[in-house]
Amino acid sequence: MMQENADIVIIGGGIVGLMTARLLAREGADVLLIEAGDLGAEASGANAGSIHLQIQYPEFVSYGEDWARAYTPCLRFLKTSLALWQDLPGELWADLGVTLAGGLIAARTEAQMAHIRAKSVIEAEAGIETRILGRDDLLRLAPYLSSDAIGGGFCPLEGKANPLQVTPHLAGSAAEAGARIVTHTRVTGIARQTGAYVVETPRGAVRTGRIVNAAGAFAGRIGAMLGTHLDIDGFPLQVTVTEPVAAFIPHLVYSAAGKLSLKQLANGGCVIGGGWPARERGNGVLVTDPKSLSGNMGMAAGVVPAIAASRALRSWTAWVNGTPDWRPILGEDPNAPGVIHALFPWVGFSAGPMTATVAAALALGRPSPVGLKGLSLLYD
């Protein structure tokens, strides 16, 4: 790749970058995607595969109702993205493991139920249904839950997908549409020229009129190359999968008692996560944290007792991007015309299809299909 040209350069080969490349290439744009490592090797391919919609319980408790109401544009955005998730397997002619059987959060105390009720009111204001269930109704819906659950909330639209299938099929479809994809190539600098940018890499430079920053946890570095501070950072998390067992958990499961996301794959393995931290070595390599592993497994077994009999097969780590108030950085850089930031924090896998749809429209010089004011931190 020596002194190439491209209409649009996309930085980052996760779900947002690949889906944006696919959309742009299908429109006839000359697209070059540059990925520092392997495609989907960070959050997009290593997350727990949850498709979220409801307000996350720990953040609701920590940040309060005013924060939750300010977050409602993100809920509407996620709801639109979930509709795109349902269409994606048919578009790619692939089994992506997309199942929207609903997500439920189990409570053990009346105080937790009060938070779930208050959260559901705000979700309803955003057009998202969360059913409040008493103990009998909850255990009738999810008999696998612990008998100490006194009730909970159920969001029918939530679910799961298989990250290991999503990014490879997106990459294949993007390449088939004409997108050029380069891996193991780090962007080392971005220089401005009259009416263009020069993206520098160890393989050479690429001159382009537009850039899409889809670099996830490392997007702040790209912003810095342009002189733009992006209030986003990377957080090392870990996930575990158990041995396959007979199917008994159709839902995405959370707990109001602590950090947990739990779901069962088509092969019977149970994926256990929920935001437990991994460790970063001095050389930047991530490793699993035994304390997080034991805490996460203990939380899972407390909510779903039968899972205690399953052996954990594998744990892995991922860099997840996050912003302080959970709102996305999505839109054209006000200081760098033609640069589109496509960053949705914490639940970026869920928001990926809609984030890419917005990024592709803006990269083509079209208006965003959804309003960004009140949604994106770039438009405050």
Image (spheres, rainbow, N blue to C red):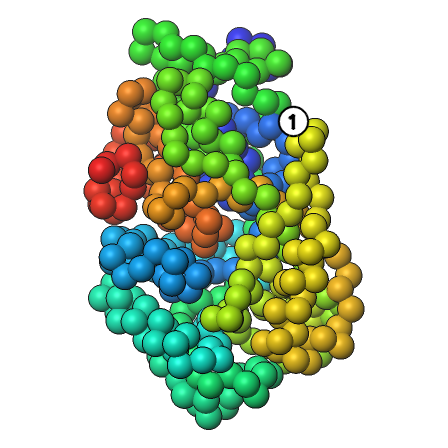
Residue drawn at (70%, 50%), measured in percent from left and top? 289
Looking at the rendered structure, the kind of residue marked 1 is His
- Quadrant location of the N terminus in the rendered image: top right
Which percent across, then down, holds residue 40?
60, 42
Is residue 292 visible from the viewing direction of this image?
yes
Is residue 30 visible from the viewing direction of this image?
no
Which element is circle 1 on?
loop
- Describe residue 196's horizontal placement relative to residue 2 as left or right: left
Which percent across, then down, holds residue 50?
52, 60
Residue drawn at (70%, 62%), measured in percent from left and top? 294
Towards the viewer: 27 or 288: 288
The image shows residue 101, relative to residue 170, as above or below, that is below
Q: Quadrant of residue 80?
A: bottom left
Name the residue at the bottom extreme: 136
Towards the viewer: 377 or 182: 377
- Describe residue 65's horizontal placement relative to residue 210 as left or right: left
The residue where tag 1 is placed is 184
Residue drawn at (47%, 85%), measured in percent from left and top? 150
